[in-house]
Image (cartoon, rainbow, N blue to C red):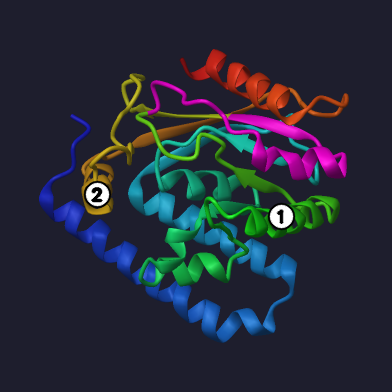
Protein backbone atom coordinates (compact mmCIF):
# COMPACT_ATOMS: atom_id res chain seq x y z
CA UNK A 1 0.00 0.00 0.00
CA UNK A 2 1.11 3.56 -0.69
CA UNK A 3 -0.90 5.12 2.14
CA UNK A 4 0.73 6.55 5.25
CA UNK A 5 -0.54 5.95 8.82
CA UNK A 6 -1.98 8.94 10.74
CA UNK A 7 1.13 9.36 12.90
CA UNK A 8 3.37 9.70 9.85
CA UNK A 9 1.01 12.28 8.37
CA UNK A 10 1.08 14.26 11.59
CA UNK A 11 4.86 14.19 11.74
CA UNK A 12 5.09 15.28 8.11
CA UNK A 13 2.71 18.15 8.78
CA UNK A 14 4.81 19.23 11.76
CA UNK A 15 7.94 19.18 9.60
CA UNK A 16 6.20 21.28 6.95
CA UNK A 17 5.25 23.82 9.61
CA UNK A 18 8.82 23.96 10.91
CA UNK A 19 10.12 24.36 7.36
CA UNK A 20 7.80 27.32 6.77
CA UNK A 21 9.04 28.93 9.99
CA UNK A 22 12.63 28.41 8.91
CA UNK A 23 11.77 29.99 5.57
CA UNK A 24 10.37 33.03 7.33
CA UNK A 25 13.47 33.31 9.52
CA UNK A 26 15.75 32.98 6.50
CA UNK A 27 13.83 35.66 4.62
CA UNK A 28 13.88 38.09 7.54
CA UNK A 29 17.40 37.64 8.84
CA UNK A 30 19.50 36.09 6.07
CA UNK A 31 18.09 37.36 2.77
CA UNK A 32 19.27 40.95 3.34
CA UNK A 33 22.84 39.61 3.55
CA UNK A 34 22.70 37.42 0.44
CA UNK A 35 23.20 38.24 -3.21
CA UNK A 36 20.74 37.20 -5.89
CA UNK A 37 22.44 33.89 -6.73
CA UNK A 38 22.66 32.87 -3.08
CA UNK A 39 18.98 33.66 -2.60
CA UNK A 40 18.11 31.54 -5.63
CA UNK A 41 20.08 28.60 -4.22
CA UNK A 42 18.32 28.95 -0.86
CA UNK A 43 14.92 29.05 -2.57
CA UNK A 44 15.72 25.98 -4.64
CA UNK A 45 16.98 24.08 -1.62
CA UNK A 46 13.83 24.99 0.36
CA UNK A 47 11.67 23.50 -2.39
CA UNK A 48 13.79 20.36 -2.43
CA UNK A 49 13.41 19.90 1.32
CA UNK A 50 9.65 20.43 1.12
CA UNK A 51 9.31 17.77 -1.56
CA UNK A 52 11.46 15.40 0.48
CA UNK A 53 9.16 15.85 3.47
CA UNK A 54 6.10 15.23 1.30
CA UNK A 55 7.63 12.16 -0.32
CA UNK A 56 7.60 13.66 -3.81
CA UNK A 57 10.37 12.59 -6.19
CA UNK A 58 11.01 14.68 -9.29
CA UNK A 59 12.02 13.22 -12.65
CA UNK A 60 12.97 16.11 -14.92
CA UNK A 61 14.11 16.39 -18.52
CA UNK A 62 14.99 20.05 -19.04
CA UNK A 63 17.11 19.61 -22.15
CA UNK A 64 15.23 22.28 -24.12
CA UNK A 65 15.51 24.97 -21.45
CA UNK A 66 18.08 27.70 -22.09
CA UNK A 67 18.85 30.84 -20.03
CA UNK A 68 16.18 33.49 -20.34
CA UNK A 69 13.37 31.09 -21.28
CA UNK A 70 9.69 31.71 -20.67
CA UNK A 71 8.52 28.36 -19.30
CA UNK A 72 4.92 27.53 -20.22
CA UNK A 73 3.50 24.72 -18.06
CA UNK A 74 0.17 23.03 -17.44
CA UNK A 75 -1.20 23.61 -13.96
CA UNK A 76 -2.47 20.98 -11.53
CA UNK A 77 -1.64 22.10 -7.99
CA UNK A 78 0.07 24.61 -5.73
CA UNK A 79 2.69 21.85 -5.53
CA UNK A 80 3.67 22.56 -9.16
CA UNK A 81 5.59 25.66 -8.10
CA UNK A 82 7.84 23.72 -5.76
CA UNK A 83 8.29 20.82 -8.17
CA UNK A 84 9.54 23.19 -10.85
CA UNK A 85 11.40 25.37 -8.37
CA UNK A 86 13.30 22.38 -6.99
CA UNK A 87 15.02 21.75 -10.33
CA UNK A 88 14.88 25.13 -12.08
CA UNK A 89 15.46 28.49 -10.37
CA UNK A 90 12.76 30.76 -11.76
CA UNK A 91 10.32 33.56 -11.09
CA UNK A 92 6.67 32.57 -11.19
CA UNK A 93 3.67 34.53 -12.41
CA UNK A 94 0.75 34.04 -10.03
CA UNK A 95 -2.73 35.42 -9.53
CA UNK A 96 -2.83 38.42 -7.20
CA UNK A 97 -4.97 36.59 -4.62
CA UNK A 98 -1.98 34.47 -3.60
CA UNK A 99 -0.33 37.61 -2.21
CA UNK A 100 -3.00 37.67 0.51
CA UNK A 101 -2.38 34.11 1.71
CA UNK A 102 -1.12 34.12 5.32
CA UNK A 103 2.68 33.72 5.49
CA UNK A 104 2.91 31.87 2.15
CA UNK A 105 1.83 34.97 0.24
CA UNK A 106 4.52 37.02 1.91
CA UNK A 107 7.13 34.34 1.24
CA UNK A 108 6.08 34.24 -2.40
CA UNK A 109 6.39 38.01 -2.69
CA UNK A 110 9.97 38.13 -1.46
CA UNK A 111 10.92 35.23 -3.73
CA UNK A 112 10.39 37.04 -7.03
CA UNK A 113 6.79 35.98 -7.59
CA UNK A 114 5.09 38.28 -10.09
CA UNK A 115 1.48 38.89 -9.06
CA UNK A 116 -1.02 39.51 -11.83
CA UNK A 117 -4.30 41.35 -11.30
CA UNK A 118 -6.83 40.04 -13.75
CA UNK A 119 -8.93 42.37 -15.91
CA UNK A 120 -6.47 45.24 -15.45
CA UNK A 121 -4.89 46.19 -18.76
CA UNK A 122 -2.66 48.81 -17.17
CA UNK A 123 -1.31 46.35 -14.64
CA UNK A 124 -0.83 43.74 -17.37
CA UNK A 125 1.45 46.14 -19.24
CA UNK A 126 3.58 46.62 -16.13
CA UNK A 127 3.75 42.88 -15.55
CA UNK A 128 4.72 42.25 -19.17
CA UNK A 129 7.54 44.76 -18.86
CA UNK A 130 8.78 43.10 -15.65
CA UNK A 131 8.70 39.66 -17.26
CA UNK A 132 10.56 40.95 -20.32
CA UNK A 133 13.29 42.49 -18.15
CA UNK A 134 13.85 39.22 -16.30
CA UNK A 135 14.04 37.23 -19.53
CA UNK A 136 16.53 39.65 -21.08
CA UNK A 137 18.63 39.33 -17.91
CA UNK A 138 18.87 35.58 -18.56
CA UNK A 139 16.41 34.54 -15.87
CA UNK A 140 13.66 31.95 -16.24
CA UNK A 141 10.04 32.96 -15.79
CA UNK A 142 7.27 30.36 -15.39
CA UNK A 143 3.67 30.98 -16.45
CA UNK A 144 0.60 28.75 -16.27
CA UNK A 145 -1.39 29.89 -19.32
CA UNK A 146 -4.51 27.85 -18.50
CA UNK A 147 -5.20 30.47 -15.84
CA UNK A 148 -6.36 27.88 -13.31
CA UNK A 149 -5.74 24.30 -12.20
CA UNK A 150 -7.17 21.05 -13.57
CA UNK A 151 -7.06 17.42 -12.46
CA UNK A 152 -4.04 16.88 -14.73
CA UNK A 153 -5.90 14.60 -17.12
CA UNK A 154 -7.07 17.43 -19.38
CA UNK A 155 -5.91 20.79 -20.65
CA UNK A 156 -7.79 24.07 -20.78
CA UNK A 157 -7.17 26.57 -23.54
CA UNK A 158 -3.86 28.39 -23.20
CA UNK A 159 -4.14 32.18 -23.00
CA UNK A 160 -1.52 33.90 -25.13
CA UNK A 161 -1.31 37.26 -23.33
CA UNK A 162 1.42 36.22 -20.89
CA UNK A 163 3.53 34.86 -23.74
CA UNK A 164 3.83 38.28 -25.35
CA UNK A 165 6.77 39.52 -23.22
CA UNK A 166 8.96 36.68 -24.50
CA UNK A 167 7.96 37.30 -28.11
CA UNK A 168 8.56 41.03 -27.77
CA UNK A 169 11.97 40.44 -26.19
CA UNK A 170 12.91 37.76 -28.72
CA UNK A 171 13.27 35.16 -25.99
CA UNK A 172 12.32 31.45 -26.36
CA UNK A 173 9.06 29.97 -25.13
CA UNK A 174 9.59 26.46 -23.76
CA UNK A 175 6.57 24.20 -23.12
CA UNK A 176 6.90 22.11 -19.96
CA UNK A 177 4.64 19.08 -19.46
CA UNK A 178 3.91 18.29 -15.81
CA UNK A 179 2.30 15.11 -14.49
CA UNK A 180 2.05 13.19 -11.21
CA UNK A 181 2.35 9.44 -10.78
CA UNK A 182 1.78 6.87 -8.05
CA UNK A 183 4.50 4.52 -6.87
CA UNK A 184 2.95 1.70 -8.94
CA UNK A 185 3.26 3.69 -12.17
CA UNK A 186 -0.36 4.81 -12.42
CA UNK A 187 -1.31 8.45 -12.98
CA UNK A 188 -2.10 10.19 -9.71
CA UNK A 189 -4.93 12.61 -8.99
CA UNK A 190 -3.74 13.13 -5.42
CA UNK A 191 -2.09 16.57 -5.88
CA UNK A 192 -5.05 18.07 -7.78
CA UNK A 193 -6.17 21.45 -6.45
CA UNK A 194 -9.13 22.20 -8.69
CA UNK A 195 -12.86 22.67 -8.29
CA UNK A 196 -14.00 22.77 -4.66
CA UNK A 197 -10.90 21.10 -3.24
CA UNK A 198 -9.46 23.24 -0.44
CA UNK A 199 -5.76 23.77 0.25
CA UNK A 200 -6.07 21.70 3.43
CA UNK A 201 -7.77 18.82 1.62
CA UNK A 202 -5.11 18.87 -1.09
CA UNK A 203 -2.28 18.92 1.45
CA UNK A 204 -3.83 16.07 3.43
CA UNK A 205 -4.15 13.98 0.26
CA UNK A 206 -0.48 14.48 -0.50
CA UNK A 207 0.52 13.69 3.08
CA UNK A 208 -1.48 10.46 2.82
CA UNK A 209 0.89 9.05 0.19
CA UNK A 210 4.21 7.49 1.06
CA UNK A 211 5.59 8.37 -2.35
CA UNK A 212 4.55 10.37 -5.40
CA UNK A 213 6.50 11.04 -8.58
CA UNK A 214 6.40 14.31 -10.45
CA UNK A 215 7.55 14.25 -14.07
CA UNK A 216 8.70 17.33 -15.95
CA UNK A 217 9.28 17.08 -19.69
CA UNK A 218 10.56 20.12 -21.57
CA UNK A 219 9.63 20.35 -25.24
CA UNK A 220 11.16 22.08 -28.27
CA UNK A 221 11.44 25.85 -28.22
CA UNK A 222 8.65 27.97 -29.71
CA UNK A 223 8.23 31.62 -30.62
CA UNK A 224 11.60 32.30 -32.25
CA UNK A 225 10.37 32.45 -35.85
CA UNK A 226 8.15 35.51 -35.61
CA UNK A 227 4.93 33.70 -34.65
CA UNK A 228 2.15 35.64 -32.94
CA UNK A 229 1.16 34.82 -29.38
CA UNK A 230 -2.02 32.92 -30.28
CA UNK A 231 -0.09 30.63 -32.59
CA UNK A 232 2.55 30.00 -29.94
CA UNK A 233 -0.08 29.38 -27.27
CA UNK A 234 -1.85 26.80 -29.43
CA UNK A 235 1.44 25.12 -30.32
CA UNK A 236 2.48 24.95 -26.66
CA UNK A 237 -0.88 23.49 -25.67
CA UNK A 238 -0.67 20.87 -28.41
CA UNK A 239 2.90 19.92 -27.48
CA UNK A 240 2.08 19.48 -23.79
CA UNK A 241 -1.13 17.65 -24.65
CA UNK A 242 0.79 15.00 -26.59
CA UNK A 243 2.78 14.19 -23.44
CA UNK A 244 0.18 14.25 -20.68
CA UNK A 245 -3.06 13.25 -22.39
Residue 221 forms part of the magenta stretch = no
Report the side of 49 relative to 210 (left or right): right
Report the side of 59 relative to 98 (left or right): right
Report the side of 75 relative to 226 (left or right): left
Lower position in the chain sequence, tag 2 or tag 1: 1
Q: Position of residue 208 (x, y in %)?
A: 21, 43
- Which residue is painted at 35% across and 29% down in the image? 151
User: What residue is disc 2 on?
Assistant: 198
- Which residue is painted at 25% across and 60% down in the image? 13
Point out which mark residue 125 bears. 1
Q: Position of residue 67 (x, y in %)?
A: 80, 45
Point out which mark residue 176 bears. none
Q: Please state the total of marks drawn on the protein image.
A: 2
Within 10 Å of disc 2 (Cα), the crowding (few <14, some 14-19, many 20+) is: few
Q: Position of residue 234 (x, y in %)?
A: 64, 21
Residue 168 forms part of the magenta stretch = yes
Amino acid sequence: MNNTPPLVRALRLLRVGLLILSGVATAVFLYPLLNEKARARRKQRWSQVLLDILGVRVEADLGHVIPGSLIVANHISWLDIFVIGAVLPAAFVSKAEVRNWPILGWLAAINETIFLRRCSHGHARLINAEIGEKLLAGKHVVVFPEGTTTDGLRLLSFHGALLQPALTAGRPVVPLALSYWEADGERSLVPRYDGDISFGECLNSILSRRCLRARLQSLPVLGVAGEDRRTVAKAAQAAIGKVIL
